[in-house]
Image (cartoon, rainbow, N blue to C red):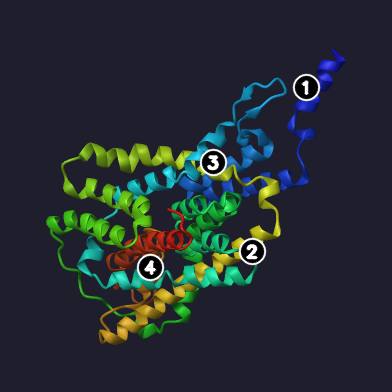
């Protein structure tokens, strides 16, 4: 009985965890607090942080299939199979379908110039790429890290998987989703620093009405044009536009509801827990993780700055018809970045309503980040 008790005692996690595991358990609890109490992206941070908690208590939950001492095949851990769907780019692509089914591209169609603002905000991605190279990361590592600047978690996971950077996927995903949740904190100081009060008070003309036909044709045309030029974007842009076509065509209500609700939330659970489970102490607690977090912040800040500066340029070219604040919404944190543009504008003038104008660059940023990911895949020959 003593041997049995001793064996059971040594099977507990207390005898098998390192100090690093305890640190990561504490980090997971902090993230859970932020998600539940502070409501920072709870739909994403709760599964991610819980996956982090599980893998640092029971590392075998991410174990790969193998062969035991008797030559028999052993099954892998539960979250290993979830994670395979990330590596194969299945879950990020399905999330894009759900995002498309919930997105209204009307503001972008009504003001096509928003495409330029969305594109300008991707400058942060390319700036971070070259900085990452200078910091010692190789090309594919730098590309996977820099995409954090788009503030788009699924795209970050997608590109890391496609470029074979699964060892970095955990830190990249945690950084991307963390910065998505911190948009209201990070962006306003940058927006106010590079705009004048007069610019922030600019009121924009009401957007024109967008017809149903335009909304139906938009996802079809965008898919053809972008995927013909850059076929590597097809998994993301194609699924985004397919989901949007479900919504706008009006004849597949069941598909729209499934893509934007049940399927979307199932995928979020699978993706979040599996990505969180890549943040074991051994993989997360190192210098590279600190560099990734710093580079993500640099990319996000540069993207916000570039969007605002291009907004200022458009303000000059249109003789004061464009409020530069909407340029910051070019990062693809939908719809939070657009809400921040509205908030900062309303602080300067409570009667100023920029939300719908900011939604144009915001949804353009989603497309822009997907294009940036496709560009990196084409550069490195990862189709």
Between discs 4 and 2, the one toward the N terminus: 2
Q: Place residue 215 in its image quadrant.
A: bottom left
Do the CB atoms of the residues marked 3 and 4 lie less than 8 Å apart?
no
- Precedes in sequence: disc 1 or disc 2: 1
| Residue 176 image position (x, y, % from top left) | 51, 57
Q: CA distance from mark 1 to mark 2?
A: 40 Å
Residue 283 in the image: above or below residue 204: above
* Mark 3 neighbour density, 10 Å: few (under 14) some (14–19) many (20 or more): many
* Disc 1: CA contacts within 10 A as few (<14), some (14-19) or many (>=20): few
The circle on residue 8 is 1
- In the picture of the structure, the residue carrying the numbered disc 3 is 274
Q: Nearer the viewer, mark 3 or mark 4?
A: 3
Q: Nearer the viewer, residue 41 or 279?
A: 279
Q: Residues within 10 Å of mark 2 (few under 14, many from 20)?
A: some
Quadrant including the N terminus? top right
- Residue located at (70% from left, 56% from top): 286
- Mark toward the start of the polypeptide (2 vs 3): 3
Classify residue 275 by image quadrant. top right
Q: Is residue 62 left or right of residue 12?
A: left
Instruction: Tell me the tag on residue 291.
Output: 2
Looking at the image, is mark 1 or mark 3 nearer the viewer?
3
Task: Give percent across and percent down for residue 177.
Answer: 50, 54
Distance (Cα) linking label 1 and label 3: 28 Å
Q: Residue tagged by mark 4? A: 330
The span from disc 3 to disc 4 (Cα, nearest Å) is: 29 Å
């Amino acid at each position: 009985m003593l041997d049995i008790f001793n064996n059971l005692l040594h099977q507990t996690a207390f005898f098998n965890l390192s100090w690093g595991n305890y640190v990561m358990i504490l980090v997971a609890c902090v993230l859970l607090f932020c998600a539940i109490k502070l409501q920072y992206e709870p739909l994403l941070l709760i599964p991610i942080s819980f996956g982090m908690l599980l893998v640092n208590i029971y590392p075998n939950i991410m174990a790969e299939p193998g062969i035991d001492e008797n030559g028999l095949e052993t099954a892998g851990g539960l979250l290993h199979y979830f994670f395979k769907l990330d590596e194969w780019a299945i879950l990020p692509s399905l999330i894009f379908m759900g995002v498309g089914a919930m997105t209204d591209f009307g503001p972008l169609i009504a003001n096509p110039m928003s495409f330029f603002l969305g594109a300008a905000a991707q400058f942060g991605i390319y700036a971070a790429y070259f900085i990452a190279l200078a910091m010692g990361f190789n090309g594919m590592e730098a590309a996977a890290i820099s995409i954090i600047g788009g503030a788009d978690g699924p795209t970050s996971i997608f590109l890391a998987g496609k470029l074979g950077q699964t060892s970095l996927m955990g830190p990249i995903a945690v950084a991307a989703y963390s910065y998505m949740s911190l948009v209201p904190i990070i962006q306003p100081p940058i927006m106010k620093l590079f705009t004048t009060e007069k610019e922030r008070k600019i009121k924009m003309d009401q957007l024109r009405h967008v017809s149903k036909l335009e909304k139906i044709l938009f996802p079809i045309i965008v898919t053809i044009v972008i995927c013909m030029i850059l076929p590597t974007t097809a998994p993301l842009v194609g699924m985004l536009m397919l989901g949007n076509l479900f919504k706008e065509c009006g004849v597949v209500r069941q598909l729209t509801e499934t893509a934007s609700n049940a399927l979307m939330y199932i995928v979020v659970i699978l993706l979040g827990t599996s990505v969180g489970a890549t943040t074991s102490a051994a993989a997360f607690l190192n210098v590279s993780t600190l560099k990734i977090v710093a580079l993500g912040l640099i990319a996000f800040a540069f993207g916000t700055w570039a969007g605002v500066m291009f907004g200022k340029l458009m303000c000059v070219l249109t003789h004061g018809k464009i409020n530069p604040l909407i340029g910051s919404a070019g990062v693809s944190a939908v719809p939070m970045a657009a809400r921040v543009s509205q908030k900062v504008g309303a602080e300067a003038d409570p009667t100023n309503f920029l939300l719908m104008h900011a939604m144009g660059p915001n949804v353009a940023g989603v497309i822009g980040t997907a294009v940036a990911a496709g560009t990196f895949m084409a550069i490195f020959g990862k189709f």
